[in-house]
Amino acid sequence: MASCFRALHCLLALSFLSSTAYGGQLTPTFYALSCPTLELIVRTTMMKAINADRRMGASLLRLFFHDCFVQGCDGSILLDDTGTFVGEKTAGPNANSIRGYDVIDQIKANVEAVCPGVVSCADIVALAARDGTVLLGGPTWAVPLGRRDSTTASLSQANSDIPAPTSNLSSLITKFGNKGLTADEMTALSGAHTIGFAHCEDFRGHIYNDTDIDPAFATLRQGNCPAASGSGDTNLEPLDLKTPYVFDKDYYPNLLGKRGLLHSDQELFNGGSQDALVQQYSTIPALFFSDFAAAMIKMGNISPLTGSAGQIRANCRVVNK
């Protein structure tokens, strides 16, 4: 009964957030007059991208997360390095790992053709993350819009603020808490790992050294991830072995069976404060979906640039001249 009440409460809260300006700054109707076809353009472009590469839904969801955790949701992760400017793309959590920049470029070009100089790259990333989730079977939500693009980036913050795959539960709670997100919201957002893949170098320590892992699962993953550092580092394995291209609740039953691919995944169900919530999500997909959508809305409101702050970049990769 408590779970049902909580799910209903989340759905009502989500409905309220979807119909009003979030935090008094962002609103889903921000471009209703200035670019009324924006969401159709984004969805159509995302459909083509995912039809060509189903991994792209997870990649753009991760891109949004890594953007919001550094300076807020401001599109700073999209900025290329130049002779006088160092961006975030070469940071440890992003280098040779973050994908989807070309899809954001294509969406931006398609939007600019219809609504030039109106829509920020930061808002495009937020919409692409939502659509990637939906197109792979996940929940939808009304994305609060009105962000503007940063003219700066922070390599140091990207290296320090984005949680590492080797993080323990305490560190994860602290990193998310620093961004105004609760431990429960962290656990809901971690469910994004129901889709996508990880590099061997990010889970090698977990499958060879940790004890909180199913031995058969560890042996299976060792087959594509050699023990020696530097060997097969970029080999990919799905975060969810069962349905890596479907956004569902299977991430959580995996944790119950000690089959989390990353050390940080398994920390959510390892005798700590999040065990009960993981158990709930593993059996109540509607609760996970509603909590995930609400947490995505809240994450999307981390320190947005609004009003006259920042700019609307013409090219998502460079600051306007």
Image (tube, rainbow, N blue to C red):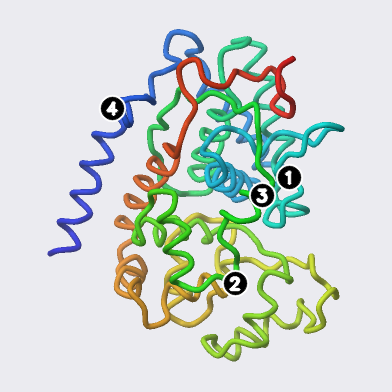
Q: Name the residue under label 3.
A: 156
1 shown above or below 21: below
Q: Disc 3 or 1, which lies upstream in sequence?
A: 1
Please, what is the three-letter code of the amino acid marked with disc 3?
Ser
Q: Disc 2 or 1, which lies upstream in sequence?
A: 1
Please, what is the three-letter code of the amino acid marked with disc 4?
Ser
304 shown above or below 112: below
The quarter in which the N terminus is drawn is: bottom left
Q: Which of marks 3 and 4 is in front?
A: 3
Q: Disc 2 or 4, which lies upstream in sequence?
A: 4
Image coordinates of residue 53 in percent, x first then y, are 70, 46
Q: Which of marks 3 and 1 is in front?
A: 3
Picture quadrant of residue 189: bottom left
Q: What's the CA distance linking mark 3 and mark 4?
A: 36 Å
45 shown above or below 263: above
Q: Is residue 90 rendered to the left or right of residue 239?
A: right
Q: What's the CA distance linking mark 2 and mark 4?
A: 38 Å
Q: Which mark is residue 248?
A: none
Residue at x 56% of width, y 32% of height: 74
> Which of the pair 241/218 is nearer the observer?
218
Q: Name the residue under label 1.
A: 89
Please, what is the three-letter code of the amino acid marked with disc 2?
Thr
Q: Name the residue under label 4.
A: 19
Q: Which of marks 3 and 2 is in front?
A: 3
Please, what is the three-letter code of the amino acid marked with disc 1?
Lys
